[in-house]
Every structure is written in C-alpha cells, then in structure tokens.
Amino acid sequence: MDLRDRHVVVTGAAGGIGSAIARRLHAAGARLSVTDLRGADMLAEELPGAVSISADVSSEAGNIDLIEAARSAHGEVDLFFANAGVAIGTDPMDAEGTWETAFAINLHAHRWAARHLLPAWLERGEGYFCSTASAAGLLAQIGSAPYSVTKHGAVAFAEWLAITYGARGLRVSCLCPQGVNTNMLNSDVVGGGGGDVVRAVGNVLEASEVAEVVHGAIVEERFLILPHPEVGDYLRHKGDDPARWIAGMQRLQRRTLGL
C-alpha cells in the first residue's frame, strides 16, 4: 500500500510500538487518527494534521465511537492498525476480570473493529487491517496464559480475515515482535519472569526499529511481520518437532523458576 494521503488509525498510540508506528506512517505521508485510553494528544501535537481520539477499545461501543470519530476527521479509514494490547495475568486461577480484560483488548477489539470496518471496505473493494499480536501468538509466553492465549487468537483472527476476504480487496498484516524496549517489557507486567525470558532468547529492539520494519511490510503488503527474524526459525522448529520444542520451552520455564 502506498501510504501517501491514506487515512490510518493507530490504537494504543500514546507510547511504545504504537507511537513509533504512527510517527513512521506519518513520515510516509499518511493522514493519522491516533488513539489511546486517555488519548494521544502529545503525539498528535507532534505530527501535523494528526487527530487524537480518546477511546476505550475494550468494548464494542468504544470501537464504534473510535471509527466514527476517525471518519469524521479524515474520511473513510484506509488502514486500521489494531495495536492496543495488555500483558496481564498468569494462569487459569487468575480472576475472571483479568482474563476478560485480556480477551477484550488483545482479541475482541480486533473483531469489533473489523465488524464495523468491513462493510465499507468490501463495498469499495479495498481496505487494510493490521494487528499487533506477538511472537507469543506464534509460539508461547512463559509466565502468562492470558497473554499467550489471546495473542494466539489475534494471529488466528488475522489469518482468517486474510483467507476469507483477500479475494475481495482486503489486505491483512499481523505484527509479531519478540523483545521491544517498551514499558510493557521493562516493567515485566506479564509476570512470572516472562520479561527476563524474552530478553534472554533474542535481541531487544527499539520501537523505532520495529516501526521501520512495519512500514516496509505494509508497503509490500506482507501478511506476517517479524521484526525479529529468529522468530520465524523458532516457528519452523515448532512445526517440525512440537515435542522437542515444548521440551525446550520447559527448560526455559525451569530456568525462570530457578529449578
């Protein structure tokens, strides 16, 4: 996709990967609607022409409000970047509210956005949906079942969209980074030592480096975006020998627990 004068919506844009992606796509000529739970006013002020929208994507109503506000500001959405995400929870014993929040933001927000974007996109025969999942969505996240499960769901939903609507003009990409130098990684909000594992198994990239890879992938309209190429190797190893891969992950788990 040529991003010049395209209307792009980026959720979770107040910091981290979201703000870096917004900056890079703006530099490519996109017209931006940026959003976060408390808005992304500082980012919008930095990027001429960008509009900040305060939206809570953890509900369908919040996604509807976001899309309507974005359309009012810049017209029909050309590219929707479902980037907002949370890394919370540990295991099946977590409170229901923890699981519900993880599902709402990491997965259902993608579904709700697509529900209200697809009719216009299919009618005009063009649209682009990009989701931020995670390497955890292709592999697994040691330390957090809610994060691992919902990110797998995000990858699966992106695949389904691409398969189902690709012949009708919909383009889909799915971003699956590993370690990125953001508050999410550095605060280890995943818990269970998950952040330490991520830092141990690969390079930690800056958000701007991820954004550069994202821009190239969208221009080329690639489905799977892997800023860490080694994730592709891990995925092949997992597919070739699942039992061996699980055994390796179990060793990482034991090392995390100091066993």
Image (cartoon, grey):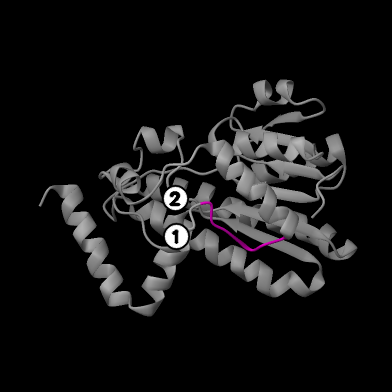
Q: Position of residue 46 (x, y in %)?
A: 71, 22
- Give the mark nearer the N terminus: 2 vs 1: 2
Q: Which residues are magenta?
A: 221-227
Residue drawn at point x = 33 percent, y = 42 percent: 195
Residue 196 colored magenta? no
- The quarter of the rendered structure image containing the N terminus is bottom right
Which picture quadrant has residue 9? top right
The amino acid type of the residue labelled 2 equals Gln
How far apart, in angstroms, are the residues tagged by discs 2 and 1? 7 Å
What's the residue at 76%, 64% (across, down)? 170
> Residue 248: image x %, image y %?
25, 65
The verdict on residue 225 being magenta is yes
Relative depth, front residue between 207 and 62: 207
Q: Position of residue 234 (x, y in %)?
A: 40, 65
Is any atom of residue 153 visible in this view?
A: yes
Q: Which SS type dominates the magenta stretch?
A: loop
Query: Which residue corresponds to mark 1?
Result: 231
Contact, CB < 8 Å: mark 2 with mark 1? yes
Residue pointed to by mark 2: 178
Q: Which labelled disc corresponds to residue 143?
A: none
Q: Is residue 150 visible?
A: no
Where on the picture, by quarter, is residue 98?
top left
Q: Is residue 205 left or right of residue 189?
A: right
Q: Residues within 10 Å of mark 2 (few under 14, many from 20)?
A: many
Q: Secondary structure at mark 2?
A: loop
Q: Could you say which quadrant of the image residue 55 lies in?
A: top right
Element on which disc 1 rests: helix
Q: In the rendered view, would you say 5 is above or below 249?
A: above
Label 1: few (<14), some (14–19) or many (≥20) C-alpha neighbours in 10 Å: many
Q: Residue at x 84, y 45 (%)?
A: 6
